[in-house]
Image (cartoon, rainbow, N blue to C red):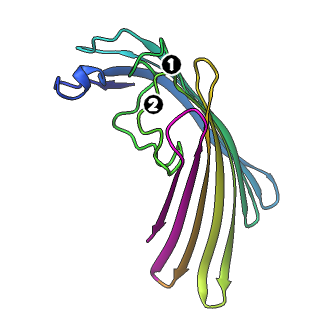
Amino acid sequence: AYLIDQDEAAVQGYRLSSQSYGARLTGGRAIAPRVTLAYQLSWARQSDYHHNPARYEADYWLADATFDIRSWKLNAGYEVLGADSGAALTSFQTPLGSVFKFQGWADKLTVTPPDGVRDFHAGAGYGWKKLRGIDALGLQAVWHRYRSDRLDRHYGDEWNVLLTAQVKKTQISARYARYQADRFATDTSKFWLQ
């Protein structure tokens, strides 16, 4: 359960106050030598709370699976932040959470759109150990296809790519995000070097 009581009218007119109740199941198991499966399933229902003037109910769903096969990691999942009436802030919101990890690195969906989000994502990664003076090197890519929950409109697609290298206690990473808009937001590219 998450009960968020936003007690300042200046912050979205109390419309970020919500109550969310749900359940989550996670697990993993070896399915062959050097092959493991990790999975997660989640469901939650969110509705208005306390001073929130909007009356709404929206569901959240997540199904995700990751296969670790030797040095490979393969992942696919489907996440839904549901919508109620299509009015602003009546879709499933996560005002205290970071969407960076979940809805792509371009940050186009930091506030869930009025018509909600359906995010199909698939990714792959590979890791090397002890490669030409580098203690560890990793490369991963994830693709997202975003659609609305209401009215089934295609918002856009996004690619995220991450390269990491570690030499002794120093880690360097380069991260790239490319969002290609269809019916939501604008085309955006971002690059990080850390």
**Residue 112, disc:** 2
The answer to the question of whether label 1 and label 2 lie on touching residues, with beta carbons closer than 8 A, is yes
Q: Secondary structure at mark 1?
A: loop
* Residue 97 showing in the rendered view: yes
- Which kind of residue does numbered mark 2 sit on? Thr
Quadrant location, the N terminus? top left
Using the image as rendered, state which of residue 106 and residue 28 is in the foreground.
106
State left or right for residue 19 relative to residue 165: left
Task: Tell me the residue at 47%/38% (across/down).
Answer: 109
Question: Quick one: label 1 or label 2, which is nearer the N terminus?
Answer: 1
Q: Residue 176 in magenta? A: yes
Q: Which residues are magenta?
A: 169-194
- Which kind of residue does numbered mark 1 sit on? Ala
Q: Give coordinates of residue 28: x percent, y percent.
A: 67, 46
**Label 1, label 2: how far apart the Cα atoms are:** 9 Å
Q: Give coordinates of residue 35: x percent, y percent.
A: 78, 56
Identify the residue position indicated by label 1 in the image.
83
**Residue 49, disc:** none
